[in-house]
Image (cartoon, grey):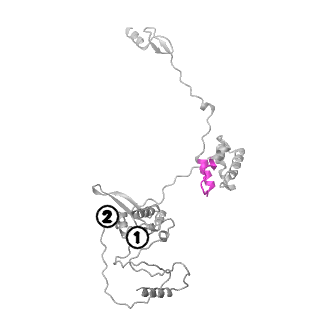
């Protein structure tokens, strides 16, 4: 059997058109006609996923809809333990390929709903309409598992077999699946509504002195942070914002610290960052002397002694209290 396998491999390599690479993998590509699954290179060659996660993702993508893909099921199918399988599923979740949610069924039961997306990037862009369905293209019986060690790009010359007439096979009718068993997948909107950008603050009067001071402060920022290199156009655009700070009695050191503190690494758009900080961190005007004065207390009505019962009561003028005045009017 080994000698026949080597001879067949040698014939296949000899039939490859074009030069064979001197090193590295050699692909022998034979087109599939049944029982195949299309897997994108974004998953098969993912730079951040582990090899176990890539294998689990390809296996889940090849399964029909409704197949159990829990940790216990995958552990019984593959030699990897539960820890590796669980880590692989978490990696797929982190990169958008897998989503597991808890849903409540009838009679208070709780089940895990697993959704696998073969192109998470296309779903985020909103350019593809997802279709829930089986990933396997054919229902023919699965062939014996054969591990391929060598695959080579390019067509392979295979002798055409003699055509043998065969009876047409009846096509099985699709079994209707109730909608409640596989509810439609609802995806979020493409993008959330964005808030309008706040306008850059402007001073009440942009005097030549304010313009000169603001322009000099913006041009001098690169001495304190080398990332803040601004063009002349960006400086002219940001001058009103700095002038508004100066008009509100903000010192140049305070403005410089607010614009240069905790810069992101790397900083790709310095003008946008400065515009945001000038708008979001704008201080209020300084209060005046009268605003800081203590509030004046309301005048207090003094106490008086009643001329009749000698009871204390509040009044601006001496006399009788309310009870004595009432008795006087009743007697009158």
Q: Give the structural element (helix, strand or loop) at label 2.
A: loop
Looking at the picture, how far across and down is residue 155, in whole percent?
A: 48, 84
Q: Is residue 25 above or below residue 56?
A: below
Mark 2 Cα within 10 Å, few/some/many (few <14, many 20+)? few
Number of the front mark, 1 or 2: 1
Nearer the observer, 73 or 154: 73
Rendered-image quadrant of the C terminus:
top left
Mark 1 Cα within 10 Å, few/some/many (few <14, many 20+)? few
Which label sits on residue 181?
Answer: 2
Which label sits on residue 59?
Answer: 1
- Residue furthest out toward the left: 107
Looking at the picture, how far across and down is residue 288, in whole percent?
A: 63, 34
The answer to whether any part of residue 197 appears in the image is yes
Rendered-image quadrant of the N terminus:
bottom left
Which label sits on residue 239?
Answer: none
Please report the bounds of the magenta region as a residue range: 258-279
* Residue 270 in magenta stretch: yes
Nearer the observer, 327 or 276: 276
Q: Is residue 203 above or below residue 11?
A: above
Nearer the observer, 29 or 278: 29
The answer to whether any part of residue 200 appears in the image is no
Q: Is residue 156 left or right of residue 211?
A: left
Q: Say which quarter of the image contains residue 138.
A: bottom left
Looking at the picture, how far across and down is residue 221, in whole percent?
A: 68, 51
Q: Give the structural element (helix, strand or loop) at label 1.
A: helix
Q: Disc 1 and disc 2: Cα gap in Å? A: 22 Å
* Residue 259 in magenta stretch: yes
């Amino acid at each position: 059997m080994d000698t026949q396998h080597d001879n067949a491999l040698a014939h296949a390599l000899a039939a490859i058109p074009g030069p064979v690479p001197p090193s590295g993998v050699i692909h022998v590509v034979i087109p599939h006609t049944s029982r195949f699954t299309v897997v994108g290179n974004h998953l098969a060659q993912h730079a951040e996923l582990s090899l176990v996660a890539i294998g689990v993702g390809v296996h889940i993508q090849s399964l029909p809809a409704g197949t159990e893909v829990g940790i216990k099921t995958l552990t019984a199918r593959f030699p990897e333990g539960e820890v590796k399988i669980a880590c692989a599923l978490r990696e797929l979740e982190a990169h958008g390929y897998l989503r597991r949610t808890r849903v409540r069924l009838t009679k208070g039961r709780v089940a895990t709903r697993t959704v696998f997306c073969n192109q998470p990037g296309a779903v985020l862009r909103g350019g593809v309409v997802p279709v829930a369905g089986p990933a396997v293209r054919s229902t023919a019986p699965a062939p014996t598992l054969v591990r391929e060690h060598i695959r080579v790009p390019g067509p392979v010359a295979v002798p055409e077999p003699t055509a043998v007439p065969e009876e047409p096979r009846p096509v099985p009718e699709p079994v209707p699946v109730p909608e409640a068993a596989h509810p439609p997948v609802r995806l979020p909107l493409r993008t959330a509504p964005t808030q309008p950008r706040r306008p850059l603050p402007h001073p009440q009067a942009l005097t030549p002195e304010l313009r000169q001071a603001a322009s000099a402060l913006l041009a001098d920022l690169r001495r304190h942070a080398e990332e803040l290199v601004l063009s002349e156009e960006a400086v002219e655009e940001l001058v009103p914002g700095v002038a508004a700070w100066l008009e509100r009695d903000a010192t140049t050191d305070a403005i410089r610290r607010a614009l240069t503190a905790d810069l992101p690494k790397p900083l790709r758009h310095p003008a946008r960052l400065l515009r945001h900080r000038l708008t979001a961190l704008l201080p209020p005007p300084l209060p005046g002397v009268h605003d800081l004065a203590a509030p004046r207390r309301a005048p207090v009505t003094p106490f008086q002694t009643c001329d009749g019962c000698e009871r204390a009561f509040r009044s601006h003028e001496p006399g009788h209290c309310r009870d004595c005045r009432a008795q006087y009017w009743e007697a009158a």
